Image: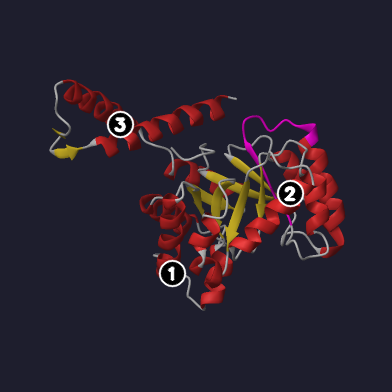
Amino acid sequence: MTPYLRPRRSMLYVPGCAPRFLNKARTLKVDSVIFDLGDSVLVDNKEASRNQIVDAILQGGFGRREKVIRVNDLDSPWGIDDIKAVADIGADAILFPNIESRTDVIEALDALDRAGGKHMPIMVMIESPLAVLRAEEIASASDRIACMIMATSDLLTQLHGRKTPDRLALHYSLSHVLLVARAYKRAAVDGISVDIKDMHSFELACRLSRDLGFDGKSLVHPNQLPYANDAFTPKPSEIALANEVIDALGQANREGRGTIMLNGRLVEHHHVNAAKRMLALVEMIGELESA
């Protein structure tokens, strides 16, 4: 099972420059809060935003929600200071932007370790053609990589692609990064949708990435939350089937059979593994939503 397994149906970027949004995040039905020090924060507000995020996390009140901090680029004027400020304040992971190589991962981990964050997992943003091409190099760089997050808006711009409902321009990149993530047992989360009023397209994007195999969607507005959570939440019929698969193949194994036909479909051991993973996530989702 994937290390650092937990629900990431919805990962909401919350800019550190907006105390009202930071406070509201404590009440939202979101799996992961990404406290953002990056592009959403103007240069003049970088340091104040850093202090506000530190204060918000130390104050607590986010329940079981995953707390992720997106720092600025390491080579920016703020990146190292960001890491020093947030390395040991109780966040669940640090998200590093613009990761394009194994070297970038190693440098990010080194900076985090020197700041007192040796215990922390990291997440990496895949936001350029070069990052997509080097996805395997990135994913294999460290087992502390908990999640690979697509930055599809940036990527689409750099591809000179067009935004279409079927997301055709992104198909290869999404599939390639997902394949790499699964090969190295990393979680994989799809990128944002910038049209926050077009919920029809957003819902379609959620379901397309779910069917492809992604764990969830990153978001920029609370209004998108219900659609992402619904798309990536196993339905009662899926849960029932998962239990049926486990029970039926378990019985078949005890009778000396390695495979069975269930409801007209061949069931093998890998289906049991998938069913157990789903049920583990369902239990985690229940705990998250009841907190």
Q: Secondary structure at mark 3?
A: helix
Q: Amino acid at mark 1?
A: Thr
Front-lying residue, 279 or 235? 279
Q: Is residue 226 left or right of residue 272?
A: right
Residue shown at 72% from the left, 52% from the top: 110
Q: Residues within 10 Å of mark 3 (few under 14, many from 20)?
A: many
Rendered view: 62 above or below 157: above
* Mark 1 crowd level (few <14, some 14–19, many ≥20, 10 Å Cα): few
Instruction: Say which residue label 1 marks.
Output: 164
Q: Which mark is residue 242?
A: 3
Of 77 and 119, the residue lying toward us: 119
Residue at 63% over, 48% down? 122
Sooner in the amino-acid sequence: mark 1 or mark 2: 2
Gap in angstroms between the C-alphas marked 1 and 2:
38 Å
* Residue type, label 3: Ala
Mark 2 vs mark 3: give the one in front. 2
- Say which residue label 2 marks: 112
Q: Earlier in the sequence, mark 2 or mark 3?
A: 2
Q: Earlier in the sequence, mark 1 or mark 3?
A: 1
Can you see residue 191?
A: no
Indicate the position of residue 236 as horizontal and vertical percent values: 34, 31
Residue type marked 2:
Leu
